[in-house]
Image (spheres, grey):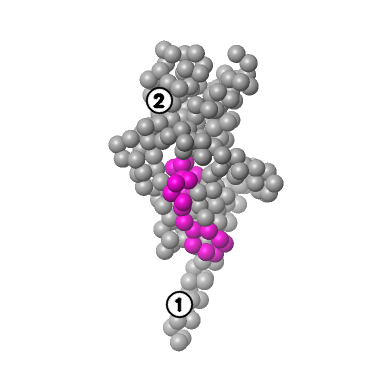
Amino acid sequence: MPLKPLAERLLDALPQTQCTRCGYDDCNAYALAIAAGDADIDQCPPGGAEGVARLAAVVGQPERAGRPVDAEFGAEGPRSLAVIDEAWCIGCTLCLDACPTDAIVGMHKRMHTVIDVHCTGCELCIPVCPVDCISLDTATPGRSGWDAWSQAQADDARARYAIHAARAKVNPPDEVAPDDAAAEGLAERKRSIVEAALARARAGNAGRSNR
């Protein structure tokens, strides 16, 4: 089977959460890796066992239908929904860049919020928040994998991710530094943001106490 059409069919079978839990940058990269023989079909926790079955049908391995996701990449579970504690949000905008479907809205130094219908539960906003004000709620108790998702939601997430990715190409982030330096730089940025937020809070308290 030709490589490109196979990759396109594999991409169509993925849930489009763009969570990177499969070990690749996005669903498209994972589909390309499967088509090239560099990745297996059981690396997508959001798709769950049904996702494995869908991919197995595409690559012609029906005997693998119904198998669970490889535990190395996580476990199938209910779909999550990101929730921002608005009382703690400092408006740093880091989560806006991290969200692959632009499900988070807000402005610099202003409170952010999540548009529930566009959130895929990818969890990518969690590690970038410097004040840990983002948590996850279970959006589909008792339902997991494709049972907790729909083709319409996958299509919407795919379209929104395409817009997000296109905008990132027009306005690319700063050049990526080596891993250690990047981690150190992110930690320093987080410290600066938190310190600035605390300084604003202290200044606000001082102003109120002088009235």
Which mark identifies residue 98? Answer: none
Residue 154 in sight = yes
Q: Is residue 74 above or below residue 82?
A: above
Q: Mark 2: which secondary structure?
A: helix
Residue occupying the point 52% across, 71% down: 200
Q: Mark 1: which secondary structure?
A: helix
Residue 127 in sight = no
- In the picture, the quarter occupied by the C terminus is bottom left
- In the picture, the quarter occupied by the N terminus is top right
The residue closer to the viewer here, 203 or 69, is 69
The residue closer to the viewer here, 157 or 134, is 157
Which residue position holds label 2?
50
Residue occupying the point 56% across, 42% down: 160
Which residue position holds label 1?
205
- Left or right relative to 106: residue 168: right
**Who comes first in sequence, dot 1 or dot 2?**
2
The residue closer to the viewer here, 23 or 149, is 149
Give the crowd class for mark 2: few <14, some 14-19, many >=20 residues within 10 Å.
Answer: many
**Which percent across, then down, holds residue 40?**
50, 21
* C-alpha separation, residue under disc 1 versus residue under disc 2: 54 Å
**Which percent across, then down, holds residue 156?**
51, 39
Which residues fall within the magenta stretch? 106-128
What's the amino acid at mark 2?
Glu
Residue occupying the point 41% across, 46% down: 81
Q: Main secondary structure of the magenta part?
A: loop
Q: Is residue 53 above or below residue 199?
A: above
